[in-house]
Amino acid sequence: MRTTSHVVCQIALLLLLALVAGAGTAGAQTIGFQAGGSVDPEQFYVGTHFESPELASNFAVKVGIDGGFGSDLTSASINLDFLYKISVGTSWKVYQGGGPVVYIFKATDLDVTETTGGLGIVFGFAHEKGFFTEFRVAGGDGPAVKFGAGWAIRL
């Protein structure tokens, strides 16, 4: 019998594979790694993401998964972000967007797992060499605010 978290992970994997298979120019695809903190619940998180090349002018899709630790919880969030990017100067871009998010929470001291969803909003800055920082606000039962930084690598 499949649990909800297994189904959610399979859906996220299928979305990621569809993006990779359907992407046109490989030079603009990125895979990234990030870490940061969240508020409500207060947690440290680490994660990874895949970003498509631009699908239209300044428009890209990013699929990510983060794992959080702290506040007597372990958590995972699976994001599907639709991003709009704006160039700032010659080497920086500001991006904003959002999309559906699936959250999985497990109480550390109990054998209780809860899966819920919502919509998230993201705002960030990215340098052409790979460094980025972003701010996320959750809609639904996810962490109220997440702030992180990371590095993206072109494939």
Image (tube, rainbow, N blue to C red):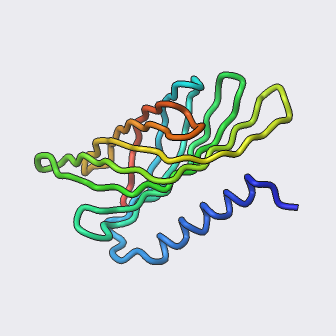
Q: How many marks?
A: 0
- Please identify the quarter of the rendering in which residue 46 is found: top right
- 36 or 84, which is in the foreground? 84
The percent coordinates of residue 62 (x first, y second) are: 43, 57
The reply to whether residue 64 is visible in this rendering is no
Q: Residue furthest left?
A: 89
Q: Position of residue 101 (x, y in %)?
A: 54, 49
Q: Is residue 74 above or below residue 86?
A: above
Tell whether 150 sits left or right of 57: right
Residue found at x 22% / y 48% = 93
Vertical order, 31 against 17 (above or below): above
Residue found 40% across the figure and 74% down from its top: 23
Image height of 131 relative to 31, above or below? above
> In which quarter of the view is residue 121 placed?
top left
- In this view, the residue in front, 132 or 78, is 78
Q: Can residue 127 be seen in this view?
A: yes
- Residue 108 picture location, percent across and down: 77, 28
Residue 136 placement, left or right of 73? left
Given residues 113 and 63, the one toward you in this image is 113
Looking at the rendering, in which quadrant would you find the C terminus? bottom left
Task: Please state, as top left, top right, bottom left or bottom right, where the N terminus lies in the image.
Answer: bottom right
Write the residue at 55% across / 67% down. 15
Residue 96 position in % (x across, y down): 31, 47
Measuring 60% from the left and 47% from the top, which residue is drawn there?
A: 117
23 relative to 48 in the view: left or right: left
